[in-house]
Image (spheres, rainbow, N blue to C red):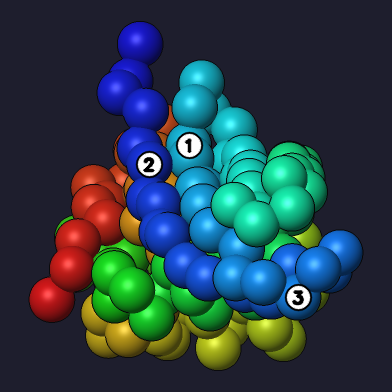
Amino acid sequence: MEQAVFESIEYSAGCQDCGAGLKCWGVQALVNGSLRWDTESRCPACGFAVAACGGDLPAELRDRLLSEHGPPRLRVDASASNTVIMRVLRAELGIGLAEVKAVLSEVLTGAFSGTMPEMEFLARRLRVSGIVAVAARP
């Protein structure tokens, strides 16, 4: 079994009940081959608390993770089959042929990036298909 990959942040926001400062935590994880996220917020002033989780990472949380940790890149072996890479990218990203060509170009040049759990998810899918791939920060 492959190791889980986590990326987390702590941040502040305004309490929707009293307006005081909320303490917030967010995490994205790659666990057992699935991407997951969750957030938790607590107000020390009024006691308001909320937790949320799901599959598709909210854009705001994704932006916070990328800002805090920086974007790792997906890297593949230069001799890898473009056809296999494209097949994996189309299946995992849910994109069409026109879009996958642009993403393939970014992958081949080392410019394709995202959160660490996202890049490791794709790297693992590529490795299962026989492509040498890694997720790494520059």
Task: Give coordinates of residue 87: x percent, y percent.
Answer: 60, 56
Asked if residue 42 is positioned above or below residue 32 in the image, the reply reads below
Judged from the image, the secondary structure of the residue bearing numbered disc 1 is: strand
Q: In what quadrant of the picture does the C terminus appear?
A: bottom left
Is 127 placed left or right of 90 in the picture? left
Q: Earlier in the sequence, mark 1 or mark 3?
A: 3
- Residue at mark 1: 30
Residue 124 place in picture, x, y as percent: 39, 39
Residue 129: % across, % down: 44, 38
Report the Cα–Cα distance between label 1 and label 2.
7 Å
- In front here: 18 or 62? 18
Circle 1: residue type: Leu
Q: Give whichever of discs 3 and 2 has the lower sequence position.
A: 2
Which residue is identified by label 3?
A: 19
Name which of mark 1 and mark 2 comes first in the sequence: 2
Please name the residue that numbered disc 2 is placed on: 6
